[in-house]
Image (spheres, coloured by chain):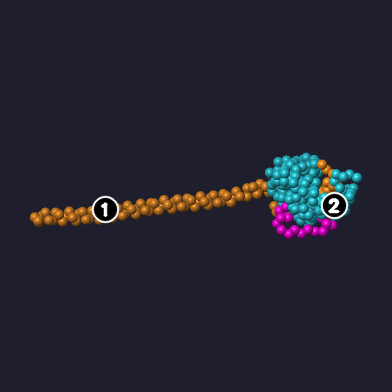
Chain colours: A orange, B cyan
Amino acid sequence: MNDEFENELKRALRPVEPDAGFADRVTAHIRDSAGRGDRIRPTVRLRFRWLPVALAASMALGIVTYEWHAHRVREGIEARRQLIEALRVTQEKLDFVYQTVKQEAHSNDDSGV
Amino acid sequence: MSESDAAPRDDSLARARDGDVSAFAEIVRRHQRLVFSLGLRMLSNRHSAEDLAQEVFLQLHQHVDEIESDSHLVFWLRRVTAHRAIDRLRRGPHREVDLSEADSVANESDGGDPLLARRLRNLVRQLSPAARAVVLLRYQEDLDPNDIARTLDMSVNTVKSHLKRSLMTLRTRFHEDGQIAVYDAGTPT
């Protein structure tokens, strides 16, 4: 329930106007921060300000991931090539040993030992 | 209902959402009284109040796409202004100026006693920031406890408690100043 004290409080706290030109100062601030013009879309600009950054980050991440994957593939191919080379060398050596042993055996047979 | 609520509806909000700065200026002019007054009564300093009001309207400009209606706009302005003012007061020392500066515009004659009004405003600014905001939303903006609770993110009981204690404090201090005989609550002469 309102009483006289509360009514006095309401009168004492009635709204007051700011100094003249307040709205002009606010809009001047807005224009200064966004360049001159009568149509400014700060909300759109702010809302999508992250978009180029996100796109650039996604592209960078994609490139790094692709390069890492390609690097791993190249490493795999190189490892397989080295393994095949090692097997080939091993096979050549085994063939050489086999031929040598075989020739030794033939020469022993021919000499009647 | 506050003056802001009573303002005629137009399409300035829609045009402001579309980036029309002159429409946004109309919104500022229509609601500057609400925002500035809340800031002034909270901070007791015209310069700080104007600074705060500018911040609030610049924030509004950034978020105008989120404002759904004129009533939402008024709610948003009260809420942001009150919270920002409370934050400023809690952040640290605040330059409060003599009453003559803060009241220079407020004391245009409207049939009330300007000296009494000044004394009451001085008492209000001695309240804690949260209690001050509750009292201002109640007696300056004429909001009921439910709306104050929504605006300040408080429970309704907390708002009622603030109001009760603040009024008691204000009355007591007012009595201590020796003015009780004229404005004593509930004891009409």
Q: Quick check: can you spot residue A68?
A: yes
Q: Is residue B101 magenta?
A: yes
Q: Please, what is the three-letter code of the amino acid marked with disc 2? A: His
Name the residue type under label 1: Gln
In the rendered image, residue B51, in percent from the top left (x then y), is placed at: 75, 55
Q: Vertically, is A85 above or below B3?
A: below
Q: Is residue B75 visible?
A: no
- Marks 1 and 2 in Cβ contact (< 8 Å): no
Q: Is residue B136 left or right of residue A89?
A: right
B113 left or right of B152 in image:
right
Label 1 lies in what chain?
A
The boundaries of the magenta stretch are: B86-103
Q: Nearer the viewer, residue B31 or A37?
A: B31
Disc 2: host chain: B
Which residue, given by chain and number where applicable, does mark 1 sit on?
Answer: A91
Q: Position of residue B91 (x, y in %)?
A: 70, 57
Return the residue at label 2.
B175
SS at circle 1: helix
